[in-house]
Amino acid sequence: MTRLHFASALLPSGWANDVQVVITAGAIAEVTPGVVPAPGDERHDIAIPGLATLHSHAFQRGMAGLAELRGDSTDTFWTWRETMYRFALAMTPDDVAAVATLLYVEMLEQGFTRVGEFHYLHHDRDGSPYADIGEMAARIAQAAEASGIALTLLPSFYAHGSFGGTAPHAGQRRFICTIDQFAALMSASRKAIATLPDANIGIAPHSLRAAAPDELAAIIPLAEGGPVHIHAAEQVKEVEDCLGWSGQRPVQWLLEHAPVDQRWCLIHATHTTDEEVTAFAKTGAVAGLCPITEASLGDGIFPAREFVAAGGAFGVGTDSNVLVGVADELRQLEYGQRLKHRERNVLSAGAGRSTGRALFDHALAGGARALAQMSFGLTPGARADIVTLDITHPSLAGRARDAAIDGWIFAAGSGAIDCVWAGGDKVVEGGRHRLRRGARERFNASVRRLVA
Ligand code: NGQ
Ligand code: ZN
């Protein structure tokens, strides 16, 4: 049993002072506001819940910052993807484990305590399955276990190069499965996470480009009620190609042809019309927004204001992991809206209400829904995922409650996290994960070789 005491804590009912939290077996057992610290309570200042990054491609952390060199023709999402494929083709299972471990360490240092790993780098370098088809999934599970982050594994089904069932190209060979191989991969993935505390599993048809309608229908039952994630409408070209193929836009097609409900998460959904926004919000499916990656790749800006006004749920994902941070994703999301609407405090819940708090609340609830966490936040029954802010950071000076969240998200950024408990285990202290050094060494050794 661990007993913590916080000067203030963000509970589901709002901020409370003098909060004692009792942790047993990795979960929150009791939350008692308005009590003085008991002898033996470990004391901290401001506590907030850990968040989920609902969309990650771990291996891409290895190439962060390596695609910022202008090419011969106009650089786009599609030219970035060629660079990314070349990198993916070179990685061994050991490289993936090293890169994912450091990434998950960094996520925890930034206040992410659960990751939705949209996992599609399945096979050996020539495209043939490993002797254990779940080899790479097992490496992801190992990385999660070593770091302490909770894992929602989302094995991805990938079969085609584009709409209409076209053949995949050579650069995609490590991602490709038949339906039978995917079923075997799902079983192996379930095995890989079986002993991992607090892990769960869903499925991820990669996109309507990569999964044909009959395949989509065949694989959805393999989720066995778990989450279903799919990339949709990230790029204008993708929307145009989808219109050419089906006469419908990707989000529209999904809403009309797939059983989209609260279990679903549409990743990006950047190019979505007013009509789609209203219908999407009604389903209860989560918009999986990845603001930093979407900016990095030149995707466009999601109509977040309209989606929230329609009652839509969203969470955030670090996606390409080019930069990892809770504060960074939430700030970028709000700043995109500001640039688009030429206004300030666009996603605040109303007059006198904090923007940072609104962003945080949405991302907490939306992330939990997208990764099938029924119980979340600082409440009995939830996993003990707790983050404390460093009140000595200059951007937090004199701030309390929502103002501290705003100071963190808009002014302090990554430097304001003090401690992080993941499943009740204090893995980050003074902003540093206990594995940081070793994880960096392994990561650096892999990446030096990969970029040589
Ligand atoms: C991915 N990433 O699967 O890693 C994709 C690129 C694609 C983003 N969409 C590949 N950000 O969508 O075809
Ligand atoms: Zn993605």
Image (cartoon, rainbow, N blue to C red):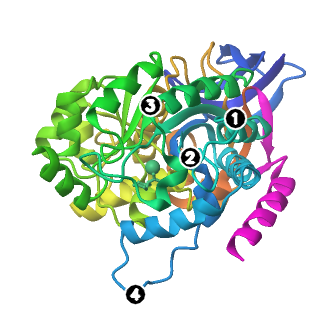
Q: Which residues are magenta?
A: 424-452
Q: Residues within 10 Å of mark 3 (few under 14, many from 20)?
A: some
Question: Can you name the residue that lies furthest to the bottom here?
Answer: 72
Q: Which badge, 3 or 2, is on the more N-terminal residue?
A: 3
Closer to us: mark 4 or mark 2?
Answer: 4
Q: Position of residue 139 (x, y in %)?
A: 72, 41
Q: CA distance from mark 3 to mark 1?
A: 17 Å
Residue drawn at x 45%, y 59% is 293
* Relative to 273, 159 lies left or right: right
Closer to us: mark 4 or mark 3?
Answer: 3
Closer to us: mark 3 or mark 2?
Answer: 3
- Residue at label 3? 179
Secondary structure beneath dot 2 equals: helix
The reply to whether the residue tagged 4 has its Cβ within 8 angstroms of ligand 1 is: no
Badges 3 and 2: C-beta atoms under 8 Å apart?
no
| Three-letter amino acid code at the position of disc 2 | Ala
Badges 4 and 1: C-beta atoms under 8 Å apart?
no
Q: Residue 261 bears which disc, if any?
A: none
| Three-letter amino acid code at the position of disc 1 | Asp
- Residue at label 4? 72
Above-or-below relation of 295 to 110:
below
- Residue at label 2? 404
Q: Position of residue 169 (x, y in %)?
A: 41, 59
Residue drawn at x 85%, y 46% is 434
The reply to whether the residue tagged 1 has its Cβ within 8 angstroms of ligand 1 is: no
Q: Which badge, 4 or 3, is on the more N-terminal residue?
A: 4
